[in-house]
Amino acid sequence: MEAVRIPIESLSPEALDRLVEELVTRDGTDYGEQERTVAEKKRSVLRRLWSGELALTFEPSSESCNLIPGDATR
């Protein structure tokens, strides 16, 4: 089954916050030369989600959410 885009407007602020926190704290998500706090990572992801640069998807086969480039689902 194909991934389904999740409109971020359909999530409560609390659900979106928890989902973004889970995404930015997954194993293997620290890249780059500088360490950033979880709060900084969350702000960055939220900004990119609201701008359309990133999109949230739900993968039925793995029952997980992921971030993808925003233009990949348009």
Image (cartoon, rainbow, N blue to C red):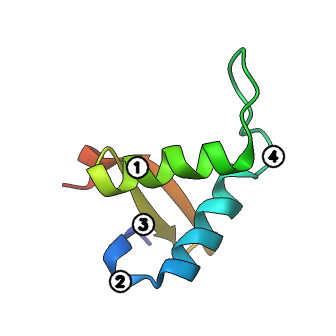
Q: In this view, does 46 lie to the left or right of 36?
A: left
- Please state if 12 lies on the left or on the right of 9 as rendered: right
Question: Which residue in the structure is indicated by mark 1?
Answer: 47
Circle 2 residues within 10 Å: few <14, some 14–19, many ≥20: few
Secondary structure beneath dot 1 equals helix
Q: Which residue corresponds to the image point at 32% horizontal and 44% vertical from the top-left?
A: 53
Q: Position of residue 19 (x, y in %)?
A: 61, 69
Mark closest to the chain's N terminus, 2 or 4: 2
Q: Which mark is residue 3?
A: 3
Residue placed farthest to the top in the image? Answer: 33
Looking at the picture, does residue 15 appear above or below residue 69?
Answer: below
Measured along the vertical axis of the image, is residue 40 above or below residue 46?
above
Residue 20 x, y percent position in the rendering: 59, 61
Which amino acid type corresponds to the residue marked 3 in the rendered image? Ala
Q: Nearer the viewer, mark 1 or mark 3?
A: 1
Q: Mark 4 is on which residue type?
A: Asp
